[in-house]
């Protein structure tokens, strides 16, 4: 198990990501057989696979992070891994435009980091939370502009946009709330038929890699 882990680390350092993912999966299988699926060693292995997966397959990465997180929360050895795992889950959720979900992960990660005194993770969470809120504000402003000029809202649900306002009390988001309510009142129900089904990823794809 240790030899496989060292091999994995060397591949990651050499940026041989495809090979690293193969070895990470092998390491996860070995760790689960050796320690059992509810051991911190196995959870760390799941974490490694998730870290190499989430950029290409965010949903798979999120699922693996969640499995690892469940174990970390139940084992003393995994306590310090809770905050970094939640932070990574926030990144993965942002990549698939699940912005409300990502804000929740960053907040939970910040709280977990505060409990262990992890200042680096606290700072990273605050920075990413602000970034995601800014992305949401930009999306709202674009939606309002499109409505004002008679352009279809482009797979954007008014309900999703309004719920965005609960993410932060930032001035730019709050002022945009007024714009949305005014525009909605002017347009009435004209755009209701154009609204897409509500979903977390209704914001389009521009937010990836931000």
Image (cartoon, rainbow, N blue to C red):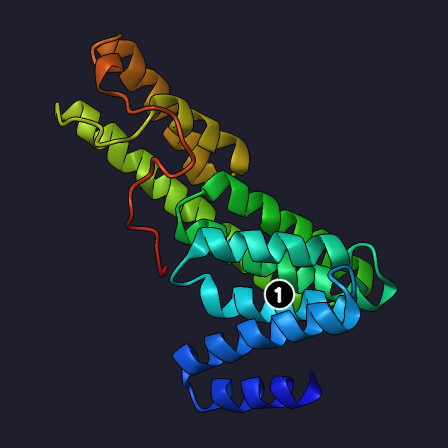
Residue 43 occupies which quadrant of the picture? bottom right
Residue at figure coordinates x 41%, y 39% from the top left: 172
Residue found farthest to the left? 150
* Viewer-proximal residue among 85 and 41: 41
Taking the image as shown, residue 82 lies to the left or right of residue 57, namely right
Tag 1's secondary structure? helix
Q: Is residue 87 above or below residue 120?
A: above
Taking the image as shown, residue 183 lies to the left or right of residue 91, namely left
The residue beneath circle 1 is 46
Q: Is residue 114 above or below residue 32?
A: above
Residue found farthest to the right? 76
Percent of width and height locating residue 84? 65, 64
Q: Can residue 80 be seen in the rendering of this structure?
A: yes
Q: Can residue 131 be seen in the rendering of this structure?
A: no
Percent of width and height locating residue 178? 38, 23
Residue at figure coordinates x 34%, y 23% from the top left: 158
Residue at figure coordinates x 38%, y 39% from the top left: 201
Residue 162 occupies which quadrant of the picture? top left
Residue 176 occupies which quadrant of the picture? top left
* Viewer-proximal residue among 97 and 163: 97
Query: Dot 1: few (<14), some (14–19), or many (≥20) neighbours within 10 Å?
Result: many
Residue found farthest to the top? 188
The quarter of the picture where the N terminus appears is: bottom right
Q: Is residue 53 above or below residue 168?
A: below
Percent of width and height locating residue 25? 54, 71
Taking the image as shown, residue 179 lies to the left or right of residue 162, namely left
The quarter of the picture where the C terminus appears is: bottom left
Residue at figure coordinates x 53%, y 37% from the top left: 167
Percent of width and height locating residue 92? 48, 55
């Amino acid at each position: 198990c240790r030899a496989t882990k060292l091999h994995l680390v060397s591949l990651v350092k050499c940026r041989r990501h495809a090979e690293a993912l193969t070895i990470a999966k092998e390491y996860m299988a070995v760790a689960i057989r050796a320690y059992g699926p509810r051991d911190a060693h196995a959870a760390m292995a799941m974490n490694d696979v998730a870290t190499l997966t989430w950029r290409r397959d965010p949903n798979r990465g999120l699922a693996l992070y969640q499995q690892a997180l469940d174990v970390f929360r139940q084992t003393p050895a995994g306590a310090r891994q809770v905050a970094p795992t939640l932070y990574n889950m926030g990144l993965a959720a942002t990549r698939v435009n699940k912005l409300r979900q990502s804000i929740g992960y960053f907040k939970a990660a910040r709280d977990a980091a505060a409990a262990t005194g992890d200042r680096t993770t606290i700072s990273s969470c605050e920075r990413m939370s602000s970034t995601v809120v800014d992305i949401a504000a930009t999306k709202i402003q674009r939606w309002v502009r499109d409505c004002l000029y008679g352009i279809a809202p482009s797979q954007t649900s008014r309900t999703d946009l309004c719920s965005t306002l609960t993410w932060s009390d930032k001035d730019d988001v709050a002022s945009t709330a007024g714009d949305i309510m005014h525009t909605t009142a002017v347009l009435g129900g004209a755009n209701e038929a154009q609204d897409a089904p509500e979903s977390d990823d209704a914001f389009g794809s521009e937010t990836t890699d931000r």
